[in-house]
Amino acid sequence: ASIEIRLAQRRDAAPVAALLGELGYPSSPEQATERLERIAADPSMWVIVAEAGSELAGLGALHVQNLVERDEPGCQVAALVVGQRFRRRGIGELLMQALEDEARRRGGKVIALNTAHRRADAHAFYEALGYEHTGRRYAKKLG
């Protein structure tokens, strides 16, 4: 089946919530709807989906921000997930290519991403696409 990459829309909320759950971020369709609406109003964010036939097979998100340490905008892959049933069909590569193309259109010279230590398969995928392991990420819960 052919794969179509398009902008995420409000009507995608239920399958987007399911994909986020597969990524390890359980979300309700209502939460996904609210997030997609917030993102649609935020020009620094760009969210796309991969459609295989009539099913949502994957999701990619790009965040572009002004940086204090560089002249060009900072571009980050904010999310990437391909549904379990659709993996190993080139969908992740298509989504990443679209995110990289958009980052270039927005003036980005470098694109970065975060991935959890436990995701060895994701690490191999990103390295195969030319990404380098360049640092560490630290997180702290605020509460």
Image (cartoon, rainbow, N blue to C red):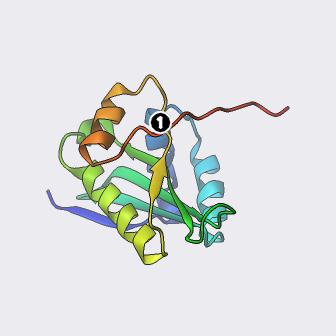
Q: Which residue, as the protein is rendered here, is positioned at the far left?
A: 1
Q: Which residue, as the protein is rendered here, is positioned at the far top?
A: 118
Q: Nearer the viewer, residue 55 or 20?
A: 20
Q: Nearer the viewer, residue 76 or 72?
A: 72
Q: Name the spot of residue 123 as percent of width and height, x first.
A: 35, 34
Q: Nearer the viewer, residue 80 or 77?
A: 77
Name which residue lies at 28% across and 34% down: 124
Q: Quadrant of residue 53?
A: bottom left
Q: Amino acid at mark 1?
A: Thr
The residue wearing badge 1 is 115
The answer to whether residue 94 is above or below residue 89 is below
Find numbered disc 1 in the image and state the secondary structure of the residue it sits on. Answer: loop
Q: Nearer the viewer, residue 78 or 127?
A: 127
Q: Is residue 20 left or right of residue 54?
A: right
Q: Is residue 117 left or right of residue 74?
A: left
Q: Name the spot of residue 44 as percent of width and height, x first.
A: 61, 68
The answer to whether residue 117 is above or below residue 110 is above
* Image label count: 1
Name which residue lies at 65% across and 63% down: 67
Name which residue lies at 45% across and 57% down: 111
The crowd level at tag 1 (other Cα within 10 Å; few <14, some 14-19, many 20+) is: some
Q: Is residue 139 left or right of residue 91?
A: right
Q: Name the spot of residue 108 as percent of width and height, x first.
A: 47, 69
Which quadrant would the N terminus be assigned to in this image?
Answer: bottom left
The answer to whether residue 30 is above or below residue 38 is above
Q: Name the spot of residue 59 as percent of width and height, x first.
A: 41, 52
Which quadrant would the C terminus be assigned to in this image?
Answer: top right
Q: Quadrant of residue 69?
A: bottom right
Q: Which residue, as the protein is rendered here, is positioned at the far right?
A: 143
Name which residue lies at 58% across and 39% down: 27
